[in-house]
Image (cartoon, rainbow, N blue to C red):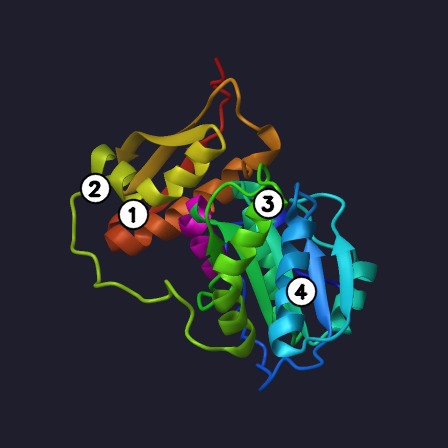
């Protein structure tokens, strides 16, 4: 079976064809659970705590457990076939830009395969994953956001995170309205300046800053925006998405804010680590 993996293609420029959400079950009693951990620390433990709650409170059934070999790559074709045999899926965790984006794409691919999926992402990557979902044909896809970080928590902290996220996970699996999914008023028109661009990207930049990076406006000419990627000494190289994908996400965010005033966005991917 061939899977679409736009996320890991550094030439990503176009939006994927629309994807519809999977039909939701009426109940979770006896449901076979897919637990897809992305390989980051404590992702598997967090999923187990949530699965325990689904069993205790909703009578969920047996579990299929898979841990990916790399957080920023999709599951293998063989692993995906195992997931297809489940009724609903849980995936965790996205706690950096690259793995958060790939985890969202995993969730969208599962939805396309007919499996209702709840994906857990830490809060700083809300703007990134919202744009990635839209670029991958699923603007309706809303992850379950949990406080950052998860990887440094002990078991008591992980259990607390699971309790905090549980209602939103159930809502995602059954199709109820998810907290935080509301849309605000349409943005007003604004002049395309470096300051306005950086302000419009503030939520997106917050995720990059969590990973030790940032995007700053370097030049704006005839609607063509050039952003400069800056890296700190402690930046996790694997956490930062390739420059073309960063540019695709930034283009999505800025065109939603400034409309046709933004013709194109390029990210200068020079390594400014000091």
Q: Secondary structure at mark 3?
A: helix
Sequence-earlier tag: 3 or 2: 3
Which residue does the numbered mark 4 point to in the structure image?
52
Which residue does the numbered mark 3 point to in the structure image?
99
Sequence-earlier tag: 1 or 2: 2
Decide which of 67, 106 is in the foreground and name it: 67
Sequence-earlier tag: 4 or 3: 4
Which residue does the numbered mark 2 point to in the structure image?
192
| Quadrant in the picture for residue 55 | bottom right
Q: Residue at x 61, y 71 (%)?
A: 111
Decide which of 52, 38 is in the foreground and name it: 52
Label 1 and label 2: CA atoms lie apart by 8 Å
| Quadrant in the picture for residue 265 | top left
**In the rendering, at what x and y percent does residue 4 appear?**
66, 60
Nearest to the eye among marks 2 and 4: give it: 4
Q: Residue furthest top?
A: 274
Q: Residue at x 42, y 69 (%)?
A: 178
Q: Is label 1 in contact with label 3 (beta carbons under 8 Å)?
A: no
Q: Residue 1 magenta-drawn?
A: no
Stretch of the chain drawn in magenta: 124-134
**In the rendering, at what x and y percent does residue 9 appear?**
62, 47
Which residue does the numbered mark 1 point to in the structure image?
262
Label 4 and label 1: CA atoms lie apart by 47 Å
């Amino acid at each position: 079976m061939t899977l679409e993996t736009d996320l890991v293609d550094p030439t990503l420029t176009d939006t994927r064809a629309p994807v519809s959400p999977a039909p939701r079950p009426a109940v979770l009693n006896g449901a076979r659970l897919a637990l897809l951990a992305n390989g980051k620390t404590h992702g598997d433990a967090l999923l187990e705590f949530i699965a325990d709650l689904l069993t205790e409170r909703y009578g969920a059934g047996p579990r299929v457990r898979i841990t990916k070999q790399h957080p920023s790559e999709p599951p293998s074709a063989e692993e995906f076939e195992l997931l297809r045999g489940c009724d609903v899926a849980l995936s965790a965790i996205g706690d950096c830009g690259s793995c958060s984006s790939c985890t969202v794409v995993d969730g969208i691919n599962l939805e396309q395969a007919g499996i209702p999926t709840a994906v857990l992402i830490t809060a700083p990557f809300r703007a990134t994953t919202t744009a990635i979902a839209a670029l991958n044909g699923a603007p309706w896809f809303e992850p379950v956001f949990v406080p950052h970080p998860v990887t440094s928590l002990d078991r008591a902290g992980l259990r607390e995170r699971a309790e905090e996220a549980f209602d939103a996970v159930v809502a995602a699996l059954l199709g109820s309205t998810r907290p935080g999914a509301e849309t605000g008023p349409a943005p007003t028109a604004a002049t395309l300046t470096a300051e306005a661009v950086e302000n419009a990207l503030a939520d997106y930049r917050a995720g990059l800053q969590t990973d030790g990076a940032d995007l700053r406006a370097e030049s704006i000419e005839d609607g063509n925006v050039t952003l400069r990627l800056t890296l700190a000494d402690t930046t996790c190289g694997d956490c930062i998405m390739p420059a073309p994908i960063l540019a695709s996400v930034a283009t999505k965010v800025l065109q939603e804010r400034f409309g046709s005033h933004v013709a194109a966005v390029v990210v200068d991917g020079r390594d400014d680590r000091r």
